[in-house]
Amino acid sequence: MAEEGDSVESFKHLTKRKVDDALSALDEAAKHPLGAPLPSPKKVKITPRKREVVSTPALVSILAASRPLPRPPPTVPESYTPTSLPDVISRISTFRLATYSPKPPSLSPPSCALHGWHNKGQRERLECVTCHKGLLITPPTSKDGGWNSPVGKRLEEEYVGMMERTAHEENCPWRMRGSSRGLYRCQVEGRTKLLESLTTLSSSITSKLGESSGTVRLAHPLTTDQVTKLEDAVQAFRRIRQTPVVPNQEPTLIPTSSILLALFGWTPSPSASPTSALFSCSLCTRQVLLNSFITVPVSASTTASSFNVVTQHQPFCPFIDPSAGAPPSASPSASSATTKRVGWKLRLDTIISKQRTSSSTFDFGGSGESLDSVGDGSGEGATKKLTTASSVLAYVRGILGPKGKRRSTGSLS
């Protein structure tokens, strides 16, 4: 019974303490009016301090080392010249029959040279002029059937992919872009410029051959009428452009053989001996010696051979190859009329073409001679009537009336 009395007393003590705490809380709440907002705490504005950067030599060196270096601008190698025809011809000149056997057109010397390859003298081996990677093109054996067999076709396709892309280094510019196929072709800019270049080249050929320039035996596919037209055009152009040494004296005529050699792209080459008539093609770089084709007194029983201005070119030469400059995937029907004609035919048609009206009075550069009056096939181009600029001007003034006078239009009835 005594333990129960102690527990009751302690419970009463705890209950009284709770009641006192509750009363104290009510007294605190009664100090503020009902519904009045409690005072808000004061806002303290904190201004951040500016951090002072203390630079030390050690810190500066660390920051400079960790900073990424600027990348230099990409530089193009000097050997990468995809738009230079002289560089393409220079690479073609390294291919020789002794070191590079005949291949399909897609692997011919021009096709390889257009993608930066040249032959350094090793058998069937190519080298890039920029990345210096090598490529060995081994032809199929006779047992496989050559390049026209199915094995040869698959091998050709594989070699073409390597030659154009995969055989180059990954960063080689020739792998990304080669030269255009249209770069390697006969460039014909116009009749006047073509006549000027033919006249200059034929004159240099005549100087190279000397007195024997008119005795070179040539074989060519031109007819007598075409030769006459070509010769008249060149002789008339030379007479107009060249200033005679003696006044009122006609310049000496250029031999027909020199004009034909110039038309088919044969140019004089420097040789060790001044008596050697060494010539080369300006596009396929084929070199020939004309000394054996110069007429000398021979007996009746001796047969003299002639220099064929067409077959002496290499098979891929644009002067004789109608597909030169055309993409390999172009079909014959889709190719243009220009790509169907061989280079020498295109040059000849440009000079002797009759697709000009009789009113054309464009001269060779202020000389007054009409283009239509030069080389029109009669064989008398040197004595044809010239259409002068003054006569044309007088004709136009006769139609328009005197200078400064307005023409009367008349009245309408």
Image (cartoon, grey):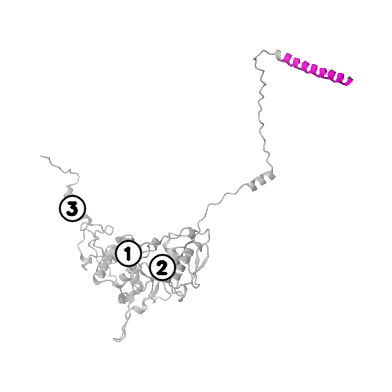
Q: Are marks 1 and 2 in contact (CB under 8 Å)?
A: no
> In the figure, residue 18 lies in which quadrant?
top right
Disc 1 crowd, CA 10 A, few/some/many (<14, 14-19, 20+): some
Task: Magenta stretch: give its range.
Answer: 2-28
Is there any visible trace of residue 403 in the rendered image?
yes
Q: Residue at x 49, y 61 (%)?
A: 165
By secondary structure, the bulk of the magenta-drawn segment is best described as helix
SS for dot 2: helix
313 horizontally vs 389: left or right: right
In whole angstroms, how far apart are the C-alphas of marks 3 and 2? 56 Å
Q: Please give the residue where the numbered disc 2 appears in the rendered image.
A: 105
Q: Are marks 1 and 3 in contact (CB under 8 Å)?
A: no
Residue 45 in the image, given as x and y percentages of width and height? 65, 25
Viewer-side label of 3, 2: 2
First-in-chain label (3 vs 2): 2
Residue 350 in the image, given as x and y percentages of width and height? 29, 63
Of residues 325 and 309, which is closer to you in this image? 325
* Residue 395 marker: 3
> In the figure, residue 276 lies in which quadrant?
bottom left
Amino acid under disc 1: Lys
SS for dot 1: helix
First-in-chain label (1 vs 2): 2
In whole angstroms, how far apart are the C-alphas of marks 1 and 3? 42 Å
| Image quadrant in which the C terminus is located | top left
Is there any visible trace of residue 237 in the rendered image?
no
Viewer-side label of 1, 3: 1
Q: Please give the residue where the numbered disc 1 appears in the rendered image.
A: 340
Q: Is residue 303 above or below residue 337?
A: below
First-in-chain label (1 vs 3): 1
